[in-house]
Amino acid sequence: MAAGTVLRPQTEARRRAGLCPAASSPSAIWAAFLIIAVVLGTIAPVHAQPDRIVSLNLCTDQMALMLVPRETIRSLSYLAVRPDISAASDRAGGIPLNHGRSEEILPLHPDMILAGRYTSRPTVFLLKRLGYDVLDQDISRSIADVRERVREVGRALGRASEAEARVAAMDARLAALAARPGERRPTALYYQPNGYTAGADTLVGDVMAHAGLDNLGARARVQGHGRMPLETLIELQPEILIVDDRKPQAPALAYEALRHPALKAMIDRSVQVIVPTRLWICGIPTVVDAVEILAAAREQVLSGGRS
């Protein structure tokens, strides 16, 4: 080493490790740093498998139950045990539940928190500010989004291979249910209390498309979820009318449209299909079960010779 040369401890460590010679020029040192950065940049980050998982959202509840052992889940949202909206309610029993409040979450000392973009916002903001690892998922508007959400949770939980297997199984079922090339797509409409329907840019609409149906909500230029007057519904005359399985807990005007005599006459000329809400309220692989129900309705219409 030349007299008067002073090496910083980090530089000395690099010299001993053979990363750079003692008398390297500045350009040689920067070249070595560049090579290291490129190599490190090509290595995907490896996530440890958290063992104190908390979910604040119905959809992430179900994905956690799908991907990790129960004993690693410290808490789920209170919605996880509702069989009308949770497809995993039978597996959620016995796991402590939360209502998205910080005082419920903090004592659990979670090492991974799963949340939804539109739920428990004050709690999510606080947990992030306190430095907790929070995955904040957006809603799914398509089956392509479902794939990404499952993979996203899989990476966060250190279960990427399990997530990929779930996606592969989902895609295999979708391929088996797809309409045959050139096959006619029967018209269909999703109709809810208060006249709400699903148009373009919705998970329901994409499920209908994967089932080989022509979504009249999108054809009527409904963007997202919006209202459709009863008169428009009757005018469109869908071959398949899709309703959910939710029943009013008390008398409600919202359900009166579904009992209208004119609608009953139209239903008598259509195929009515009930898709349980729990199958497609969330962007999880159970949406394939909804595709299967609607694909069976498609076959019923086509085999009946409806035009």
Image: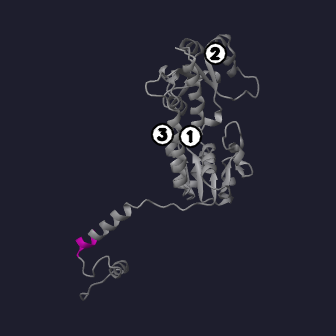
Marks 2 and 1, how far apart at CA: 29 Å
Q: Which numbered disc covers residue 283?
A: 1
Dots 1 and 3: beta carbons under 8 Å? no
Disc with the residue nearer the chain's start (3 vs 2): 3
Image height of 303 relative to 77, above or below: above
Left or right of 227? Residue 4 is left
* Residue 230 in magenta stretch: no
Image height of 222 relative to 292, above or below: above
Q: Position of residue 19 (x, y in %)?
A: 32, 76
| Helix, strand or loop under label 3 | helix
Observer-nearest of 104 and 160 = 160
Alpha-carbon neighbours of circle 2 within 10 Å: few (<14), some, or many (≥20)?
some
Image height of 85 relative to 187, above or below: below
Residue type indicated by callout 2: Ile
Residue at mark 2: 267
Dots 2 and 1: beta carbons under 8 Å? no
Observer-nearest of 49 and 297 = 297
Q: Residue at x 49, y 26 (%)?
A: 223
Residue type indicated by callout 1: Gly
Quadrant for the N terminus, please. Answer: bottom left
Name the chief secondary structure element in magenta.
Answer: helix
Marks 3 and 2, how far apart at CA: 32 Å
Residue type indicated by callout 3: Ala
Q: Position of residue 111 (x, y in %)?
A: 60, 60
Disc with the residue nearer the chain's start (2 vs 1): 2
Residue at mark 3: 144
Residue projecting furthest to the bottom: 3
